[in-house]
Amino acid sequence: MSLPGYTAENSLYKTREYYQFASTQTEYLDGQGLVAPTQMTGGDLMGAFCFDTLGRDPFPVTVYVQGQLVQASPPMGGRTNFSLTQQSTVSPGGVKCVGFNVSGLQAGTWNVRARANTTGSAGPCPARVPGYIRLGVSGGQGPWCG
């Protein structure tokens, strides 16, 4: 199964509508393709940071994602915080999303923040590990969690 406008080589998604499409198919986007929920293991957090784009030429974007454990759930074990940098090249035109995947996390409730070198930040947003989160600053609505 593939999403219209999704390209695996740059981990970008065209609009939030494609996320809604994916969620109706009970599958999650991982920045490299689609993953069935049964393939998600404890300790993994998958997600995407979305933002508006302008211009005519592709440009590099660096997305910074940070997370902090708020409340642990059994089984115990795994990291209690993370920080990652995800780089991508974006072709302008509407909303773009850069996917990310963090492994080895303690199961439970997390606060997640993200920003790009070209945008403001979103968060803290609540997330469950294992799980999927999307957050962004797209659509003229300011920071959002979804």
Image (spheres, rainbow, N blue to C red):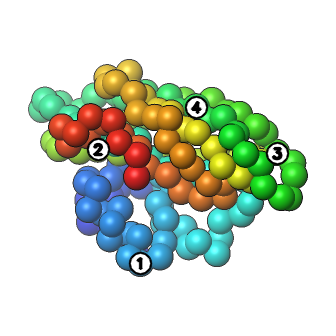
Considering only order in the chain, which callout, 3 or 2, is on the residue closer to the N terminus?
A: 3
Determine the image quadrant of residue 96.
top left
Q: Residue 96: give its label.
A: 2
Pointer 3 or 4: first along the chain: 4
Vertical order, 32 against 54 (above or below): below
Q: In percent of the image, x 73 and y 45: which residue is there? A: 71
Q: Residue at x 71, y 52 (%)?
A: 108
Query: Which residue does the image show at 53% across and 56% down from the upper left?
Result: 132
The x and y percentages for residue 19 are 35, 62
Q: Nearer the viewer, mark 4 or mark 2?
A: 4
Q: CA distance from mark 2 to mark 1?
A: 21 Å
Q: Separation of disc 4 and disc 1 at Cα?
A: 28 Å
Q: Nearer the viewer, mark 2 or mark 3?
A: 3
Rendering coords of residue 70 (x, y %):
68, 40
Q: Name the amino acid, label 3.
A: Gly
Mark 2 nearby-residue class (10 Å; few <14, some 14–19, many ≥20)? many
Q: Nearer the viewer, residue 100 or 59?
A: 100
Three-letter amino acid code of the residue under disc 2: Lys
SS at mark 4 in the image: strand
Q: Image quadrant for the N terminus?
A: bottom left
Q: Amino acid at mark 1?
A: Gln
* Secondary structure under the numbered disc 1 in the rendered image: loop
Give the CA distance from mark 4 to mark 2: 20 Å
Q: Is residue 127 left or right of residue 29?
A: right
Q: Which residue is mark 4?
A: 66
| The label number, if any, that marks residue 78 in the structure image | 3
Upstream in sequence: badge 2 or badge 1: 1
Mark number for residue 25?
Answer: 1
